[in-house]
Amino acid sequence: MDDDSRTTKRYLSGDYLSHNPTWDSEDAPWKAGLIREVLAAHGLRPHSIADVGCGAGAVLREMRRAFPEARLAGFDVSPDARRFWTEAPALKIEFSVGDFFTLARPGYDLALVLDVIEHLPNPFDFLERLRGFAAHYVFHFPLDLSAISVLRESPLLYSRRKVGHLHYYTKELALALLADCGYDIIEARYTGAAFTAPQRTWAARIAGPARHLAFALSKDWGVRLLGGETLMVLARPGTTP
């Protein structure tokens, strides 16, 4: 079994579903709202949207409300995701199980890549291959890497065990990865996950006052110190690879 098959087996065997029975659908309205905000800020109204690694497809269901005429397509490698797609015909969303690069064709106005990069054995190869498929991209990165998470270590191991994170990012590391793979960053913004994400843990709630203080002094330094944030990035393919 090669490295890719070892690390993707959990999505094919039912292991991921057993640890994440809702596939984080609770976060979908929050994420979709953030996506709509960043698109509106730049005057973008896509007519075709691909969600790469769509999971339960809940973000696309939310996006349908904002883009009633758009072509929406979701792709995921896990057969378990199908159980969440029962509303797809009524909402005119196309869902597919399998490899995105085999199933999709270039030409989308927008590709969503939400909480995907940190799961991939080779994010560089994936991002370089993905670059030609859409005019714009929205990426969402959990910023797992912070001074406190390195000192404690258990949060990093927990995210590896429960949701399969193989790589950990700060804001600047995430942006450097995209730049190295040939993307031009249009905007990168913190999502406010430390205070507004639907599935905040009790530990995140307890840390709230300290984060408020640290973020008020310096958002970037506060996030690197205490974590708890995620990053949404609007990008486009670079003019030079």
Image (cartoon, grey):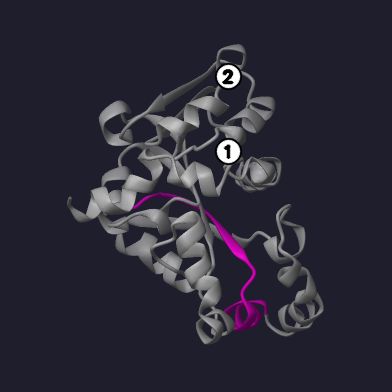
Helix, strand or loop status at disc 2: loop
Q: Which residue is mark 2?
A: 86
Q: Which mark is residue 44?
A: 1
Between discs 2 and 1, the one toward the N terminus: 1
Q: Residue at x 45, y 42 (%)?
A: 136
Q: Give the SS element for disc 1.
A: loop
Q: Position of residue 71 (x, y in %)?
A: 51, 21
Q: Residue furthest right?
A: 209
Q: Residue at x 35, y 54 (%)?
A: 120
- Mark 1: which amino acid? Leu
Tell me where residue 211 appears, x and y as whole percent: 74, 78
Q: Pointer 1: residues within 10 angstroms few (<14), some, or many (20+)?
A: few
Q: Residue at x 82, y 78 (%)?
A: 209
Q: From the viewer's perspective, is residue 107 above or below residue 241? A: above
Q: Nearest the camera: 216 or 154?
A: 154
Up the image or down, 130 lies above or below 86; here it is below
The answer to whether residue 9 is left or right of residue 89 is left
The disc label shown at residue 4, or none? none
Residue sitting at x 63%, y 31%:
63
Q: Which quadrant of the structure image shows residue 29?
A: top right
Q: The C terminus lies in which quarter of the figure?
A: bottom left
Q: Tell me if 103 is positioned left or right of 42 in this view.
A: left
- For this rendering, which residue is in front, 77 or 66? 77
Q: Is residue 98 left or right of residue 212?
A: left
Amino acid beneath label 2: Thr
Which residues are the magenta region? Answer: 219-239
